[in-house]
Image (tube, rainbow, N blue to C red):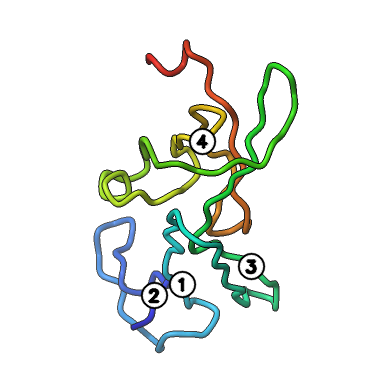
Amino acid sequence: MSVWHGNLQKRKRTGGRKRCYRGKRKFEQGTFAAETTIGERKKRVVRGYGGNLKLKVLTDKFASVTDPKSGKTEKTTILRVVKNPANVDYDRRGVITKGAQIETALGLARVTSRPGNDGVINAVLISSKEEKS
């Protein structure tokens, strides 16, 4: 099954129907989400548009966590996914995306990178003030 990012089957601004005048094209092809979870490190290299390579993290148990007060970054283990505001289902399944809150050995942190596109999990420690809100 493929993912298609074309817009031939959408409607016009006036509400009228757009009729397909051709088939699907290779450049309109999309991919499935990486849906990064906690586990042994597993990455996948995907060829993107124009021959660019994209590194997707499928599973990982480490994150680079930065303390904004001291400015130091440390590689720590991810204990669990606390909250994922991107999707309720991701929240339940423990999928890590940008903006997800993870519990690490250093404390609660918010993911700032895009693991499905960047190939790394970077996070920033959350202060106790932000935790309550």
Nearer the observer: mark 3 or 2; the answer is 3
Can you identify the residue that label 4 sits on?
104
Q: Most extreme residue toward the right, as rendered?
A: 71
* Depth order, front residue of 54/77: 77
Residue 56, by quadrant, is: bottom right
Specify which label sits upstream in the sequence, 1 or 3.
Answer: 1
Kindly report the distance in space between the C-alpha atoms of the residues bearing marks 2 and 4: 34 Å
Can you identify the residue that label 2 sits on?
3
* Depth order, front residue of 85/2: 85
| Residue found 38% across the figure and 86% down from its top | 21
Label pair 2/1, CB-CB below 8 angstroms: yes
* SS type, badge 1: loop
| Numbered mark located on residue 54 in the image | 3
Label pair 2/4, CB-CB below 8 angstroms: no
Side of 90 relative to 114 (left or right):
left
* SS type, badge 2: strand
The amino acid sitting under disc 4 is: Thr
Specify which label sits upstream in the sequence, 2 or 1.
Answer: 2
| Residue found 42% across the figure and 59% down from its top | 35
Q: Percent x, y for residue 11?
A: 29, 64
Side of 129 relative to 88 (left or right):
right
Side of 64 relative to 90 (left or right):
right
* Depth order, front residue of 87/65: 65
| Residue found 40% across the figure and 89% down from its top | 23
Can you identify the residue that label 1 sits on?
31
Side of 128 relative to 17 (left or right):
right
The amino acid sitting under disc 1 is: Thr
